[in-house]
Image: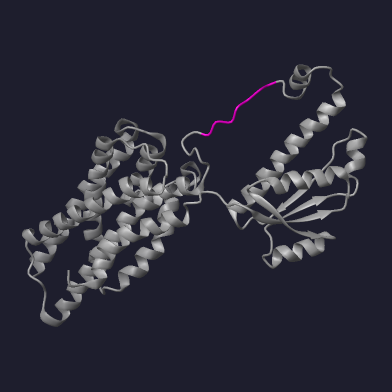
Amino acid sequence: MKDEGVLLFFIFLPVAYPLLYSWVYNNEVVREVPIVVVDDSHSALSREFIRKFDASPDVSVALRCKDMHEAKDKIGHGEAYGILYFPSDLDMKVGRMEQGHVSVYCDMSYMLTYKAIYQTATNVSSVMGSELQRRMLGKYTDREEEISIKPLEFEDVPIFNTTGGYGNFILPGVLVLIIQQAMLLGVGMLAGTRREKALREGPEQQSLNKLFGRATTYFLLFAVMLAWITLVVPRLFGFVSMVHGWDLLLFFLPYLLACVFFAMVASEMVRYRESVMLVVVFASVPLLFLSGVSWPQSNIPAFWQGVGCIFPSTFAIRGFVRMSSMGALLGDCLTEYVALWIQFVVYFVLTLVIYVRKKSYS
């Protein structure tokens, strides 16, 4: 309690970081993405397309340019994220009952802005295409027009991530990873402090009471933090949460135990209290990728999948995403559940081996 750095990682980080991440991603989707219009057609058809495109909540026609060179310059200066281009022969081709083309250029460095621009253009194109087709068919009744334009009716029903938002997509994985990283930072800093003190005052006397006392303290403290992160924070910000209480409790029991002893094993490699921050913070983003949440697990090379199996967060993230976003029960996450118990046993045994060796040397 006298170490401000440890308190920062044990209490402030698990409490504040989930709030910060959730607040940042709370809007779920981007709105009013600015785009540039280059209209070489100057026709009623292009103007109608632009009006419908601008009426979408996702995009906004911010600028109009005379040519593509000027439009690309606006993109390069960050004034817009996409270009909507209408060729000069658009109206003529449509009038001849030929296929017209509207080109959409997107800044691919931002996934969410690209998605907003591209999907809006696709939706407007589909709606206007149906209207043009209806005019040219010459059918007598609305039902005939409906069957001719859309012979196969379909309904788009999003499942699991019902909002289609980035927050519901990425937050479950981030929240679980925070627990492991905070524990690694705090336990590593404590271990570094003890080693620095040993250099000045001599090695610390080892005992099983100290070993299990520390493990129990870490477990109880982070059990509270885990409940805050997985049960309270998603409800505060309205994220999808379909967890079942007892299943979640049973699933996270081996995760916390594995994290505790994994952190104690990893802390043996920490010589100075500051050095742990460099490694753990650097590894956070790769660990999120290795979990298979932000990148499909099937597309991760076998070697890196093996590396991911070292960390408890990999299996915990996969299981929690299924429980939180898909309403899965413990039996649906049995592979991850067993893997977490195996990790706990392995890291517990490694901790005891390290303790016995240190005691024999002392």
Query: Can residue 342 be seen here?
Result: no
Measured as percent of width and height from the top left, residue 228 is found at: 29, 51
Q: Give left or right: position of 91 versus 35.
A: right
Measured as percent of width and height from the top left, residue 217 is found at: 15, 57
Q: Is residue 206 above or below residue 215?
A: below
- Which residues make up the magenta segment? 152-158
Say how the picture is coloured. Answer: one colour
* Residue at x-position 24% and y-position 67%: 7
Measured as percent of width and height from the top left, residue 295 is found at: 49, 47
So how many labels did they put on this image?
Answer: 0
Q: Give left or right: position of 110 versus 132.
A: left
Q: Give left or right: position of 135 versus 198.
A: right
Q: Nearer the viewer, residue 244 or 292?
A: 244
Q: Which quadrant does the N terminus fall into? A: bottom left
Q: Is residue 355 above or below residue 231?
A: below
Q: Is residue 198 above or below residue 215?
A: below
* Residue at x-position 84% and y-position 17%: 140
Q: Give left or right: position of 260 versus 123.
A: left
Q: Nearer the viewer, residue 170 or 305?
A: 170
The quadrant where residue 64 appears? bottom right
Q: Is residue 154 magenta?
A: yes
Measured as percent of width and height from the top left, residue 286 is found at: 43, 57
Query: Can residue 175 be seen here?
Result: yes
Q: Nearer the viewer, residue 222 or 27?
A: 27
What secondary structure is the stretch in magenta mostly built from?
loop
Q: Is residue 38 above or below residue 275?
A: above
Q: Is residue 117 magenta?
A: no
Q: Which quadrant does the C terminus fall into? A: bottom left
